[in-house]
Image (cartoon, helix red, strand yellow):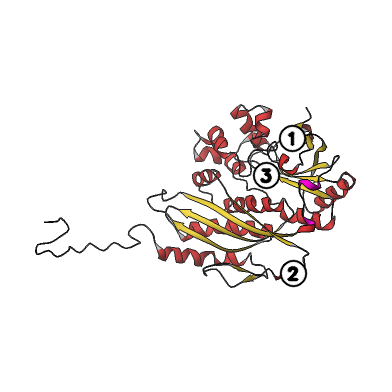
C-alpha cells in the first residue's frame, strides 16, 4: 500500500500549513506598509498620481512637454556590504539615504533631474518597526534629492536569509533636455576639476573596510569615541551616509548654463576608475593629491589595509564624492555658486591632452 494512502485507498489529508507558519506574515507586511505611509507621502511631488499600494507607481511627465527633446535617464544600485555594519550596530536609519544617493548621483552625472524612486527590501523576518526605519531613511534620501518615492517591494525570505538580515536595492528615473546634457563630448583642454567633498567611504569598498576596520571589534568597541576621528566613534564614521549632490549641482547647472562640461560620481573604483568616464579619448585629467585632505577615517582604512597611494585611489573616493569638469573661464563663478549652496568645493586639477586617462601630479 502506498505510504500516502489509507486503508481502503483514500488519500490521507495533509495537516494544514499556512503561509504565516511557513515564515511569511502577510498581516505584518500590511502593518509595515501602513507604517511607512507618512514617510513616503513626505517625498511626493505634484506629478505623483495615486498612492502606494497599487500595482504600479504613477508619475505624470507632462512637465517634460516644455523641453526640446526630453530624455529619460535611469539608474539602479544597492548599498552593498555596508549593510552588515548597520546590522551589527543595530542602526538602520541612514542606509536608505545611501541607497538613494548611489542611484541619483549616478543619473545626475549627465545633468538629469531625478523624478522618482522605487526601492526593494529583502529581509529574513519582516517587522513593521524595522521596515519603517529603513524606508524612512529612503524617504529622507528622496527628500534630499527632490524626487518622489512612488513604490517599492518588501519581500520576506525565511529560510534564505537569517531573520535579522536584509538587503536593499533601488531604482531612480530622471529627465534631462538633450541640448542641456553634459558629458565627455563637452570636455575641453584646460577645463578645471572642481571637486565636492564626500562624507567618508560613502557606500563603496566596504568588503575591504569591514575586513580591516570592523572584524575583531565588538559593537561596543565600534561605538566608543575615537581620538583619531576627533571624538566620533568608528562605527559612526563608517555609517556616515553617502552625500547627495543633486540640489547644489542642478542649481549650478541652471544658474550657469554651459559652465559645467561633465560630472564624475566617484564610487567603486575610486577617483582613478570613475573620473576617466567623464573624459573623451584625447584628453587626460591630472589630479593634484595635495589639493585636499583625505578624511581621517579613509586614512585609517588605507593604513590598516597597507594600501599604496595608487591602489587607494582606485579603491576609495579619498574624500571626493563628485568631480565637476568646468570651463576654466567660469571656474570661479561655479565655485561661488556651489559655496552659496552650502558646499565646500576645491579645485583638484585640470584637463590636458592625453588618452582618456587619470594621472596624478606627484
Q: CA distance from mark 2 to mark 3?
A: 37 Å
Q: Residue at x 41, y 64 (%)?
A: 26
> Which residues, given as a range, are shown in magenta?
180-188
- Say whether residue 89 is magenta: no
Q: Residues within 10 Å of mark 2 (few under 14, many from 20)?
A: few
Q: Which mark is first along the chain, 3 or 2?
A: 2
Decide if residue 231 is on the left or right side of residue 289.
left
Give the foreground label among 2 and 3: 2
| Residue 186 in view here | yes
Q: Element type at marker 1?
A: strand
Q: Is residue 52 above or below residue 343?
A: below
**Rendered residue at 63%/57% (across/down):** 172
| Residue depicted at x 76% and y 56% | 250
What is the CA distance from the residue labelled 1 to the residue labelled 3? 23 Å
Residue assigned mark 2? 65
Q: Position of residue 221 (x, y in %)?
A: 53, 37
Q: Which mark is residue 199?
A: 3
Left or right: residue 136 versus residue 63 is left
- Rendered view: 216 above or below 5: above
Looking at the image, is mark 1 or mark 2 earlier in the sequence? Answer: 2
Which residue sits furthest left? 8
Q: Nearer the viewer, residue 91 or 105?
A: 105
- SS at mark 2 in the image: helix
Location of mark 1 (residue) = 358
- Residue 81 percent location from the top left of the image: 53, 43
Residue 345 left/right relative to 45: right
Is 340 placed left or right of 82 in the picture? right
Dot label at residue 132: none
| Eye-nearest disc, 1 or 2 | 2
Number of other residues with Cα within 10 Å of mark 3, as a class: few under 14, some 14 to 19, many 20 or more:
some
Amino acid at each position: 500500500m502506498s505510504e500516502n494512502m489509507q486503508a481502503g485507498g483514500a488519500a490521507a489529508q495533509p495537516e494544514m500549513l499556512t503561509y504565516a507558519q511557513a515564515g511569511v506574515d502577510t498581516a505584518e507586511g500590511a502593518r509595515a506598509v501602513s507604517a511607512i505611509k507618512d514617510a513616503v507621502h513626505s517625498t511626493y511631488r505634484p506629478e505623483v498620481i495615486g498612492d502606494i499600494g497599487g500595482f504600479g507607481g504613477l508619475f505624470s511627465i507632462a512637465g517634460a512637454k516644455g523641453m526640446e527633446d526630453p530624455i529619460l535617464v535611469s539608474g539602479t544600485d544597492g548599498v552593498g556590504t555596508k549593510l552588515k555594519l548597520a546590522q551589527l550596530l543595530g542602526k538602520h536609519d541612514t542606509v536608505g539615504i545611501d541607497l538613494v544617493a548611489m542611484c541619483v548621483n549616478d543619473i545626475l552625472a549627465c545633468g538629469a533631474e531625478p523624478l522618482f524612486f522605487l526601492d526593494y527590501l529583502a529581509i529574513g523576518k519582516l517587522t513593521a518597526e524595522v521596515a519603517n526605519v529603513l524606508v524612512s531613511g529612503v524617504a529622507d534620501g528622496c527628500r534630499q534629492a527632490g524626487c518622489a518615492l512612488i513604490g517599492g517591494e518588501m519581500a520576506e525570505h525565511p529560510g534564505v536569509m537569517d531573520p535579522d538580515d536584509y538587503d536593499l536595492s533601488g531604482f531612480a528615473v530622471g529627465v534631462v533636455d538633450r541640448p542641456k546634457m553634459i558629458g565627455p563630448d563637452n570636455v575641453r583642454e584646460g577645463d578645471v576639476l572642481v571637486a565636492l567633498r564626500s562624507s567618508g567611504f560613502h557606500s563603496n569598498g566596504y568588503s575591504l573596510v569591514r575586513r580591516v576596520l570592523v572584524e575583531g571589534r565588538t559593537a561596543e568597541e565600534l561605538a566608543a569615541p575615537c581620538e583619531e576621528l576627533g571624538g566620533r566613534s568608528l562605527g559612526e564614521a563608517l555609517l556616515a551616509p553617502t552625500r547627495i549632490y543633486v540640489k547644489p549641482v542642478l542649481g549650478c547647472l541652471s544658474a550657469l548654463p554651459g559652465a559645467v562640461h561633465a560630472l564624475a560620481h566617484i564610487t567603486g573604483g575610486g577617483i582613478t576608475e570613475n573620473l576617466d568616464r567623464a573624459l573623451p579619448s584625447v584628453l587626460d585629467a591630472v589630479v593634484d593629491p595635495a589639493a585636499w585632505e583625505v578624511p581621517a577615517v579613509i586614512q585609517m582604512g588605507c593604513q590598516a589595509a597597507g594600501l599604496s597611494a595608487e591602489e587607494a585611489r582606485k579603491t576609495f573616493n579619498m574624500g571626493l564624492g563628485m568631480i565637476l569638469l568646468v570651463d576654466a573661464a567660469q571656474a570661479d563663478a561655479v565655485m561661488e555658486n556651489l559655496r552659496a549652496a552650502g558646499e565646500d568645493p576645491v579645485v583638484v586639477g585640470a584637463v590636458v591632452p592625453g588618452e582618456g586617462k587619470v594621472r596624478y601630479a606627484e
